[in-house]
């Protein structure tokens, strides 16, 4: 059983509750000079030293950093993200922290590191860039894990295939990188990528976490095709058509360098069981290459904003959206955004109010009026040559015109509306970081995402909005959120903005999200993704037939990773050598 390591040191480097409140289950081991802030569970100082020496032999000293002091945790911003802790911490800066970070230089090194971790029984937490903000960033679920920074050295665009409209990328390729590649090679008139709200994360990391963007290719996992994966024991596989050798491949090359099958990025399923899904939001492999389909430039584009003046018109708006979206008249992944999300991009809280209470309906009406916005704001786009767009627009405009007071805008009508101008780019796959701004709603702003799936129905949207707003306000926060409309459902993203340097604010944020998880489960709503601190709680809500799905996942985990070294605890899956209960994180009280 994995137990001892150590409690967090006495001193914090600022921010979050004192460490004593959150005891790490990996016990008390005396600390020696040169030790990391937190040793991996069950590993002595001496074993750790041996391990890092071997690691440096594999990857080079420059690619191994032991996290010895709080100073290493100074990186706090999306633009310069930390590789060893959660910048948006709710449990103190030093809770979710790596013991060391290694940056492999190639697939063979990833394999060697996995074998080494098996030998020393050291848990490893892979990440691509570490900009998974709101969900834990680069931080490991088990404090003291080895962070594996795949993006630093493995960041090549291996192929952009124009005819087949796909790319093959390594973990460190960001949305900006891929977009810039298209621009620099004069390919934007042929191909577009799909981007999430912020473009600094990796295409691969976002896809394996099942993140979304906003063009017609918004479901990234749906649009991926083919993976190359290092398994926990160091074995290398290619999924789908990648398992079929290319007759022209050089058998003398190591497998990861062999020319892949020509259909690897064209057909997802290959032959036999389709495996890719078990490597997403999972701990069964390290994805080292991934194919992603690119959207063919549709030959014309028009983004738009529809403002919906009254809060209670949310119901009517969602009822209008459903038939249009399932019929694909709404071609992309549109969003229905609460006024405060847009307002927060345009100014911090202080610029709107001196009150510390959650904003009232009257105050929100005033803010909406100031920015020429509705209480809800619908951002969509039309794709195709002019005649196609004109017909689509007639249908969309006609349907939304049923909403009393709805107004329709194109970006050129609102040159000063920074949100509309940014969405205009995002909805055609041009990455940006403008929307980072809403995190500054509060001083020392950080955020958590509460992300339940909702039916595209007025009743469900209204019920989720009322519940989440009420709980946010109980905790002293403003409701800031958006409904992201997928093909058959909505990702309702509630942005819980808190002050990371104020322990009380951190505690209230933690309280509100864990309370909402339970509230939502009682209504039959489940989240699609979460922060590392909440993974166990959410996993417990997916409990059909006595949690049969988790038993199944557990069996796969223990078979593929018998020593439990790859990302233990990720998404609530704990290897058999961990006591799941001991690692659970307590819910705070309000
Ligand atoms: P981003 O690229 O958006 O910055 P991260 O690199 O922080 O995202 O990755 C988010 C999460 O996705 C990680 O914490 C990890 O659980 C998982 N992940 C990322 N990259 C990989 C990978 N190459 N293989 C396996 N899991 C990965």
Image (cartoon, rainbow, N blue to C red):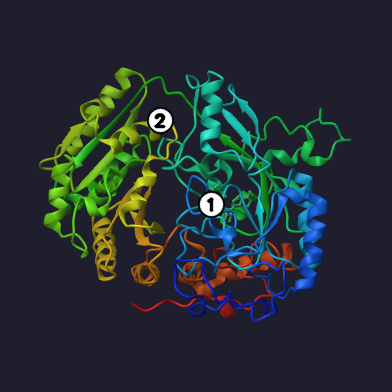
**For the residue with label 1, is its CB less than 8 Å from the closest atom of ligand 1?**
yes
* Residue 115 spot, x, y in % from top left: 80, 58
Drawn side of residue 577 relative to residue 318, left or right:
right
Q: Is 35 left or right of 209, judged from the image as shown?
A: right
Q: How far across and how far down the image is residue 217, in percent?
A: 46, 36
Q: Is residue 585 above or below residue 461?
A: below
First in sequence: mark 1 vs mark 2: 1
Q: Is mark 2 within 8 Å of ligand 1?
A: no
Around disc 2, counting alpha carbons within 10 Å, would you say few (fewer than 14), some (14 to 19), or many (20 or more)?
Answer: many
Disc 2 target residue: 428
- Considering the image in quadrants, where does the N terminus appear? bottom right
Residue 122 visible to an observer of this rendering? yes
Identify whether 408 is placed above or below 335: above
Give the alpha-carbon distance from disc 1 to disc 2, as whole Å: 22 Å
Which percent across, then down, holds residue 27?
Answer: 64, 81
Residue at 57 percent across and 80 percent down: it is: 581
Q: Judge whether 515 appears above or below 124 on screen.
A: below
- Per the image, the residue denoted by label 1 is 209
Say which of 116 and 336 sits in front.
116
Which residue is at a point 34% across and 31% down the rendered structure image? 424
Mark 1 neighbour class, 10 Å CA radius: few under 14, some 14 to 19, many 20 or more: some
Residue at x 79%, y 63% (from the top left corner): 51
Quarter where residue 433 is shown: top left
Residue 109 in the image: above or below residue 577: above
| Residue 329 seen from this side | no
Q: Can you say which quadrant of the picture contains the C terminus?
A: bottom left
Q: Tag on residue 44?
A: none
- Foreground residue among 271 and 313: 313
Give the secondary structure at mark 2: loop
């Amino acid at each position: 059983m994995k137990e001892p390591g150590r409690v967090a040191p006495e001193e914090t480097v600022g921010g979050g509750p004192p460490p004593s409140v959150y005891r790490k289950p990996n016990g008390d081991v005396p600390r020696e000079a040169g030790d990391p802030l937190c040793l991996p569970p069950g590993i002595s100082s001496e074993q750790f030293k041996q391990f890092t020496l071997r690691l440096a032999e594999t990857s080079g000293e420059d690619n191994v950093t032991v996290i010895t002091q709080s100073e290493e945790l100074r990186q706090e911003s999306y633009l310069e993200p930390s590789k060893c802790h959660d910048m948006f911490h709710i449990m103190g800066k030093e809770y979710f922290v790596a013991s060391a970070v290694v940056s492999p230089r190639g697939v063979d090194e990833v394999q060697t590191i996995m074998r080494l971790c098996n030998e020393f029984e050291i848990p490893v937490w892979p990440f691509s860039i570490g900009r998974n903000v709101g969900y834990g960033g680069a931080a490991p679920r088990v404090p003291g894990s080895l962070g594996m920074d795949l993006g630093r050295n493995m960041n090549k665009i291996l192929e952009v295939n124009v005819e087949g409209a796909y790319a093959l990328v390594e973990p460190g390729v960001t949305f900006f990188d891929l977009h810039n590649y298209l621009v620099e090679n004069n390919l934007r008139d042929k191909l577009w990528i799909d981007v999430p709200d912020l473009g600094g994360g990796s295409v691969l990391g976002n896809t394996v976490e099942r993140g979304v963007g906003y063009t017609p290719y918004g479901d990234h996992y749906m649009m991926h095709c083919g993976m190359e994966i290092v398994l926990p024991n160091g074995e290398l596989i290619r999924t789908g058509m990648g398992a079929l050798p290319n007759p022209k491949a050089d058998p003398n090359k190591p497998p990861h360098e062999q020319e892949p099958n020509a259909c690897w990025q064209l057909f997802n399923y290959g032959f036999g069981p389709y495996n890719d899904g078990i490597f997403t939001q999972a701990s069964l492999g390290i994805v080292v290459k991934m194919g992603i389909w690119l959207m063919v430039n549709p030959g014309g584009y028009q983004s738009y904003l529809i403002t919906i003046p009254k809060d209670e018109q949310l119901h009517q708006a969602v009822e209008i959206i459903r038939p249009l979206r399932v019929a694909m008249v709404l071609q992309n992944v549109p969003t229905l955004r609460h006024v405060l999300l847009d307002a927060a991009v345009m100014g911090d809280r202080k610029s709107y109010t001196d009150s510390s209470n959650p904003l009232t309906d009257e105050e929100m009406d005033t803010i909406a009026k100031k920015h020429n916005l509705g209480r809800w704001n619908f951002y969509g786009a039309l794709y195709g040559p002019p005649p196609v767009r004109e017909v689509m627009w007639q249908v969309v405009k006609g349907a939304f015109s049923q909403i009393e007071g709805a107004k329709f805008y194109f970006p050129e009508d609102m040159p000063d509306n920074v949100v509309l101008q940014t969405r205009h780019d995002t909805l055609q796959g041009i990455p940006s970081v403008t929307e980072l701004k809403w995190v500054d709603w509060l001083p020392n702003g950080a955020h958590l995402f509460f992300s339940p799936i909702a039916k595209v129905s007025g009743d469900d949207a209204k019920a989720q909005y009322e519940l989440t707003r009420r709980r946010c306000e109980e905790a002293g926060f403003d409701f800031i959120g958006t409904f992201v409309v997928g093909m058959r459902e909505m990702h309702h993203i509630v942005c819980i903005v808190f002050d990371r340097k104020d322990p009380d604010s951190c505690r209230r944020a933690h309280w509100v999200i864990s309370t909402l998880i339970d509230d939502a489960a009682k209504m039959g709503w489940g989240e699609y993704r979460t922060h590392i601190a909440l993974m166990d709680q959410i996993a417990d809500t997916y409990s059909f037939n006595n949690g049969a799905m988790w038993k199944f996942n557990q069996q796969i985990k223990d078979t593929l990773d018998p020593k439990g070294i790859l990302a233990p605890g990720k998404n609530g899956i704990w290897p058999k050598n961990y006591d799941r209960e001991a690692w659970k994180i307590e819910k705070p009280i309000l």
